Image (tube, rainbow, N blue to C red):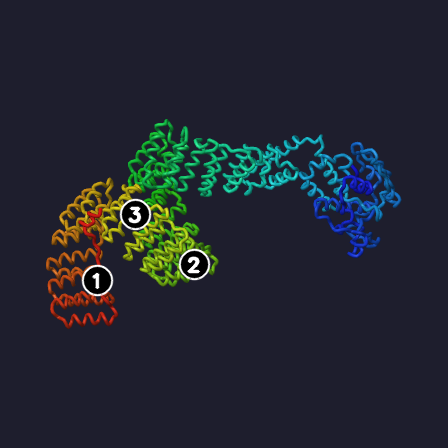
Amino acid sequence: MVLLEKMDYRTVINVKDELGFVDHLGRWNVSGHTDGYERLTPSESTRTGADPPDARRPFLVPLALAAARLAAAGGTAARSGWRRREAGTRRPERRRAAEQEQQAPAAAAAHSAVRLGGASAEWRPASATTAVARRQTRTVTAACPGAQLSGPATPSPSNPLPSGQGLVHLTIRVRWLIVFRRMLYERMIAIRELSRTVVAKTDKIVALKLCRRLSEFISGANSGYNRLCVVEKFAVLFQNCTDVRSLKNLHARVLTLGLSRDAILGSEILICYNSLGVLPKTSLCLQGFLNGNLAQLNSAMVYIFRAGYPEEVILLYRGSKLHQIGLDEKTVTFGLKSCIELRNLLLGKAIHADSLKLGLGRDNFVGSSLVGLYSKLARMDDSEKAFEEIMGKDIVSYTSMITGYYENIDSTSWNAFQIASDMMRSNLEVNRVTLVSLLQVAGNLGAIKEGKLVHCYSIRRGIGASDEVLGTSLIHMYMRCGAFQLASAVLKNSIQSVASWNALLAGLARNGQSENAVHHFSVMVHEHKVIPDSVTYANVISACTELCNSSYAAIVHAYLIRRSIPLDVVLATTLIEVYFKCTRIMRSRHLFDRLVVKDVVSYNTMIYGYLRSGMANEAIALLKEMMAECVAPNSATVLSLLVAITDQKDFVRGRWIHGFAIRHGFCSDVDIANQIIHMYSGCGKVAAARIVFASLEKKNLISWTTMMMGCLFSGHGGEAVRLFQSMQQHGERPDSVTVTTAVKAVSELGHLKGVKQVHCFVYRALLEKDTKTTNSLITAYAKCGRLDLSVHLFLSLDHRDLDSWNSMISAYGMHGFYVKVLEMFKLMEEGNIIPDGLTFSSVLSACSHAGLVKEGLCMFESMTSMYSVLPQEEHYGCIVDLLSRAGHLEEGYKLIKFSTLNNKSSAFCALLSACRTHGNTILGQIVSNELLALEQQNPGTYTLISEVFAHKGQWNESANIRSRAKESGLRKLPGCSLIESVEQANNQC
């Protein structure tokens, strides 16, 4: 090897000329780290011919710097563009190094000579003390004939110092020209790294060692270089790597050495990354190992997917298709799993198409992944088709299908138990995961019979009480089905973990047994010594919320303080909610102010609590404070504001919230837009609701249904029917709620033909087994005069719920079959159906119209004594009407006066109407005064009082009442009614 400090520049020039290179490095203005030389001024640099750097070869710049510095350290010459300092101007920090160079023995220079292949170098001894020794000449014999060049090593303007690029080109010319051209691009990064290291060093010996490393590195391209040996050494290093920093350094070294496509190293790198749990977030640094190797591609997809980067898995999948590596079942499976994580249905369908082209659609793993994909995205029809195409279904396939039914609870979820039966007939043993999925389906459907069968099977398999997860699922299932005793028995005979207790407490709170939940929490802590977690405390506090008992919440709060349990945001937010429901607003605010970290959920709870308490100004002020604290409101914030304002029917503040949503870009959210439509409809502003509905670019099913309900409740039934037709023209498939709204709209119009048309649609949409839809049809046919069809639908129901009985009782009452009403009520009691307030309203109304005073009073008394139903305004109205029809006006007045009603206006109206009928003007005058005190802005009240006086012939008093109404700006609204003739409708149908 020719050393940098002894190289003859003419040799380099000749070599470069033969290779056809253009060199600017010999005349660059290099950095001022060179000992004994200083920069020229711009004018001097121009005179000496110093050229600007060549930006096309920046990786060779450090080599040039190294050459100039090493040569200057030996005191041999100066570069072009540099001039030598005077003796007294040498830098102090370089003085010691220069003195050491001058005192170095001549053997150091002789030792530096290395034989290079066929080239020979003859050196004269270099003296360290005289300038003559430094001006010795040498002769270089090149490897090729005629390449022997000689000349003095002394620098001159025509013979500047050799550059770093000259070193590389000399090496090429002497021995490795062809090899260097092959490895140039692959080794460019390594050359840059080593050469920069040479420049950064100040010691000449270290620099020479690094140059030797550079030469050895370049010799790696020689035929004698054992690449396999290097790969094996790196593989051992990766196998023994135990920390992340070393792993990344080794990986970087592999990339710089051009081993980025080695399959062995690729496998070791993937395994090492996975074992340390630090897979890179991007697959770009692994692309070199993966191209052309399907097995390594699959391994990388598995590791990266488990590390939580599904986007990178999709990139690898696309790369495999782009580079024509190929696809197999493993590639397709993890591509589908990534689509599930990304919830990308379109991409999942594309991968499904690839699997069909490759004949992998019937593979167990691919099929199970397809079932999971379509189930997660609520496409159960496609999920069932994918399940049917699987050949040789295994336990994973069956479990994926059952889990899909659990995640999409509807009328088809009952098929999960049929799938389980088919699996057992296929001689496949149901495992714990399948049993847990079946229990979750049974709990959500309320199928306690099927849940008991699953429980029995688990006991026969011996995994009933010994498995904690299965035991918790059993408790959850029984609590969802309302079987508290069975859930307690399972808890008693299973592992009593905190998760099991949480399932029991959550079930009790959900089933309205909040006080029982608080009691079991005490038993859990004091008797069983189970340490609660944050979920336990949240369940207990939620139970206190349902009880509206702030003392229980305060006890739990004190328990947390005594145990020094820090209040996280979840617990604090739950406590704030319970204090608000118990009207302890100041305590809620105090707890909120003490929170160190306030997130958007805590702000939402406070805002909603203020709105529910009627403190809209405080809620809006807190919203402004929230934004001032740089806590960005989310869609839940706006939704909570809209829900509370909708309940209060506050149009002014609702319009302000609508403007806030527009300013902050929330109106693009379909859920918020739907709530705005509902808010305007609830406030009676149907025109504003139509404008918001028309501005929606993407309307979903809820948008159409909300607009239909708004039109229906505002008395625009015809427009609701037109919306029902229009949504089908736009390709939206109505559900049971939409169909029920359409049935109510048609029935309000009294249009029998329209009801029948909607009924036909119910059969086409396979909704005839939906109980709510059938109940609405029963009421609709009764309103249109077809009681026979209502009875037929009621008898065709497989499962009759409370609404079914209420609809049928109301239908008989509308048609005057009062005896049938009482008979249906008795049948309802025999069927263990507990009546509600609506049931008693229909029964009491029937008794009133039939004149059954005794039966009506007994029914009214049984409301509170037997069924714990608190009488409401409509119930008192029915009883007053019942007593009034029998002539017991005084008893009716006393009943109203001693009632606990907040609003007694409807009951007084019924009594006043009875006073008009019976001509009791004295009591009528008393009731009129009561009514005017309650409802001064109701024109119907003035009209009724005026008619009472007119019926008795007291025209002056009647005229005075009408004058008072006119002075108050009240006007009686004209009434109207619609009904379709039954005969005409039958002829049309």
* Label 1, label 2: how far apart the Cα atoms are: 41 Å
Q: Amino acid at mark 3?
A: Val
Q: Where, quadrant-wise, is the N terminus in this rendering?
A: top right
x and y, in percent, of residue 25 in the image? 76, 47
Mark 1 — residue?
905
What SS does tag 1 mark?
A: helix
Seen at 44% across and 42% down, the residue is 345
* Label 3, label 2: how far apart the Cα atoms are: 32 Å
Numbered disc in front, either 3 or 1 = 3
> Is the residue marked by circle 3 packed among few (<14), some (14-19), or many (20+) residues within 10 Å?
many
| First in sequence: mark 1 vs mark 2 | 2
What SS does tag 2 mark?
A: helix
Q: Quadrant of residue 452?
A: top left
The answer to whether 223 appears left or right of 762 in the picture is right
**Nearer to us in this view, 878 or 709:** 709
Seen at 45% across and 43% down, the residue is 343
Mark 2 — residue?
662
x and y, in percent, of residue 145 in the image? 83, 33
Residue 566 tag number: none
| First in sequence: mark 3 vs mark 2 | 2
The answer to whether 848 appears left or right of 354 in the picture is left
Mark 3 — residue?
739
* Label 3, label 1: how far apart the Cα atoms are: 35 Å
The answer to whether 39 appears left or right of 129 in the picture is left
